[in-house]
Amino acid sequence: MNRFSQIRSSRRQQGLTLIELLLVLVVVLAIAVVGFVTFGQTSASQRAQAGQQALLSVSSGVKALSNGPNYTGITEATLVTAGKAPSNLVNAVGTGINNPWGGTVTVLAKTVNGGSAGNSYMVCMNQVPRDECNTIVASSHSSFAMVSAGATACPTALTLPTAGILKNIYAATPVVPNPTAIATACNSEINTIVWIGV
């Protein structure tokens, strides 16, 4: 090998050029951005699944404690006391239920469609993020008589939801949810979802 080839070869082995270094940084940054976006979407999906699981568990607990279609006296506290609340969501005080988003789960007896007192029950979750709200409403509405969502508070013991109604089988013209209505109702960064079951 001649002397010129040795000098040229040694220069190539000295390190990366500025262009090569910039290309490596761009590739690393692109991978990091894709990973961050994918992680955020996966986390939202997992929280929506956890919310769906919590809803099903609470609903099953309510039905296990009821005497026929009479839910009078059933609250989140009675579910906790009876051991029918999801144990991983019971609050630190041991009297209530938290949801996967750091909000609360409210459970109350309701009266619907002119029936006897306490003929239905309400499960309400607050502080539900937009994406999770869309997912959980779309996947759970078929199991309930009424569903509402939006930026309002959980209804009190004597009231039913009046805004953001996505499903109501008792209405003169039954309301059935569709993706556009769900997206419109879940338009806040923090939503409240109300399910009325029978």
Image: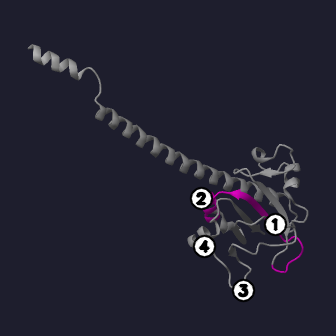
Which label lies toward us, 4 or 3? Answer: 4
**Quadrant where the N terminus lies?**
top left
Which label lies toward us, 1 or 2? Answer: 2
Seen at 86% across and 45% down, the residue is 94
Q: Is residue 38 left or right of residue 65?
A: left
Above or below, comparing residue 25 to residue 9 in the picture: below
Residue 160 lies in quadrant? bottom right
In the image, which residues are magenta? 113-138
Q: Residues within 10 Å of mark 3 (few under 14, many from 20)?
A: few
- Magenta stretch containing residue 128, yes or no? yes
Residue receiving disc 2: 131
**Quadrant where the C terminus lies?**
bottom right
Estimate the x, y position of residue 70 in percent, counting from the top left.
Answer: 87, 68
Which numbered disc flags the more N-terminal residue, 1 or 3? 1
Real-space CA distance between mark 1 and mark 2, rounded to the nearest whole angstrom? 25 Å
- Is 180 or 1 nearer to us in this picture? 1
Which numbered disc flags the more N-terminal residue, 2 or 3? 2
Q: Please name the amino acid that badge 1 sits on.
A: Tyr
Residue receiving disc 3: 172
Q: Please name the amino acid that badge 3 sits on.
A: Ala
Seen at 74% across and 59% down, the residue is 125
Please say if the residues under marks 2 and 4 sit with CB atoms less than 8 Å apart. Answer: no
